Amino acid sequence: EVQVSESGGGLVQPGGSLRLSCAASGFTFSKFAMNWVRQTPEKGLEWISGITGDGGSLYYTGSVEGRFTISRDNSKNTLYLQMNSLSAEDTAVYYCAKGSGYYYYFCAMDVWGQGTTVTVSS
Amino acid sequence: DVVMTQTPLSLSVTPGQPASISCKSSQSLLNGDGKTYLYWYLQKPGQSPQLLIYELSSRFSGVPDRFSGSGSETDFTLKISRVEAEDVGVYYCMQGLHLPPYTFGQGTKLEIK
């Protein structure tokens, strides 16, 4: 069964850092792009970052560029999101989502994890 | 960024009756390869989003054939031919052509009467 599962969420102070992980199983991880999507009641679903199968191309939405870094370790079938300079606006449920192809473009996000909650508060 | 606008934001449907959700994009989602990069997702209560429809009208693996997607360029529709209790949740459209970023509609909440 194709699965992805996030971990690493929690409570962090404003200005702090957090690293999320996403463990993948049931498919050849290196052959598929991966994404991070977050959700809040106020803004709904917001795609924030994507990475190609080989990790060679990275993509970000404007509000996180320069603060967040997406990466992957294909030997460990794991996706990461390093989040720095966090603010209250980053409070959300963060989902890992598998792309339907190798490249970021022209792909659906076809399998999602259960999400991990990040709360930024003092 | 491409803006996705869904209507209605909520609907209440009697089991066995049809339902329809509209989604409009601020730019055409028809690509030069002839494909339209419009997707539909369902987020059931307490769950993560699940893919229903990809590239305008193709059902994802395991999705019942009562779900169908249609439309062209900037106007899209998700139809459920006969609503069942398990269809409750929030439906989202998403564009996957003008990247980055992927952008989602606000969501349409479906409840059962």
Image: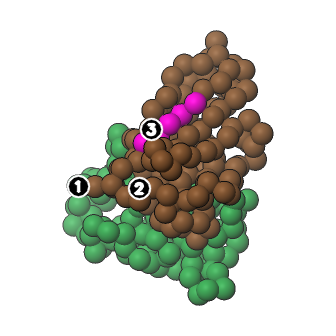
- Please state which amino acid type lies under the numbered disc 3: Glu
Foreground of the two, A108 or A21: A21
Pointer 3 residue:
A6
Q: Which lettered chain is shown in green?
A: B
Mark 2 or 3, nearer chain start? 3
Q: Which mark is residue A111?
A: 2
Q: Which lettered chain is shown in brown?
A: A
Q: Nearer the viewer, mark 2 or mark 1?
A: 2
Q: Is residue A30 visible?
A: yes
Q: Nearer the viewer, mark 3 or mark 1?
A: 3
Q: Give the Cα distance between marks 2 and 1.
A: 23 Å
Measured as percent of width and height from the top left, residue A107 is found at 54, 67
| Main SS class of the magenta portion in the image | strand
Quadrant in the picture for the N terminus of chain A? bottom left
Q: Is residue B57 left or right of residue B14?
A: right
Asked if residue A62 lies in the magenta stretch, the reply is no
